[in-house]
Amino acid sequence: MESLRARSVGWVSQEDHVAAARTVYDAAAERYVRLVGTELSAATEGPIDRSLLTAFVELVAAGPATNVADVGCGPGRVAAFLAAHGLDVLGVDVSPAMLVEARNAHPGIPFEQGRLDQLPVTDGSLAGIVCWYSIIYTPPERLADAFAEFVRALSSGGYLLLAFQAGSGEPVHRAGAHGTALSLTNYRHGLDDVTRRLEKAGLHVHALARREPELDHESTPQAIVIARCR
């Protein structure tokens, strides 16, 4: 999970942070699945987290279409939750090894390789996107690229749910990430900064929550935002 130690890191390019996350999760996929499982659970998501995922399902289900993407899906934990609640789900992840784990655990759900800023879907084709702790490896100055891609992929009125570790945009450098010999940097994004960038991208913030750390693996506040494409 997340390290308690942080240090300042310099600017990283778009390719650097994407490649770093892919490399770590390719190396750590089996261990990661042993740690967090392939389904949502009370050990990894608190009551507020699960309630907002349920709210997202209800918001999407009230519309004319139910096709959604779990972006940064990992082993398909959120994708399985969405599918079990009646949505048509596509899982997307940058790590081929994670996609193998997801397909093995959830053979009835399609999974494809893709990035936050390069989704394998056509324009306006999604009624919803869940990005469950997937922007934590994206530097704040690169969030606009991902949010613009979400707007491209969402239909008018489609919903986006973002979850992330809250802070003020500070980087947290982890040596030996997820039990590997590799380093990875994640970012504790500021809630105000994220909502401002979402609005600028063309997404109206519909609801937001910030809660204190309550689970064993948490050391910082957690934030969840639901936004709607204009």
Image (spheres, rainbow, N blue to C red):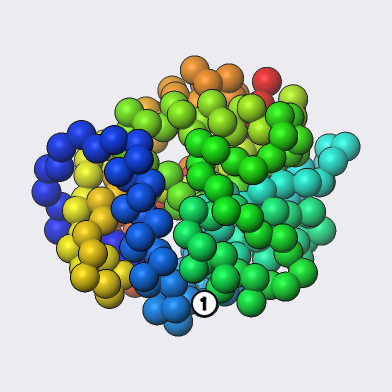
Decide: is 189 above or below 75: above
- What amino acid is found at the position of numbered circle 1 in the picture? Gly
Residue 95 image offset from top left, x and y in percent: 47, 59
Count of numbered badges drawn on the protein: 1
Residue 51 visible here: no
Residue at position x 64%, y 43% from top? 120
Apparent side of residue 164 relative to residue 153 in the rendered image (left or right): left
Apparent side of residue 221 relative to residue 97 in the rendered image (left or right): left
Residue at position x 35%, y 50% from top? 19
Apparent side of residue 145 relative to residue 73 in the rendered image (left or right): left
Residue 218 image offset from top left, x and y in percent: 33, 63
**Quadrant the C terminus occupies:** top right
What secondary structure is marked by label 1?
loop
Decide: is 59 above or below 203: below
Residue at position x 51%, y 30% from top? 147
Q: Along the line of sight, which residue is nearer the eye, 12 or 42? A: 12
Residue 38 visible here: yes
Residue 219 image offset from top left, x and y in percent: 27, 60
Residue neighbourhood size for the residue with mark 1, other residues' Cα within 10 Å, grouped as few (<14), some (14–19), many (≥20): some
Residue at position x 55%, y 38% from top? 118
Residue 28 image offset from top left, x and y in percent: 37, 72
Q: Which residue is mark 1?
A: 37
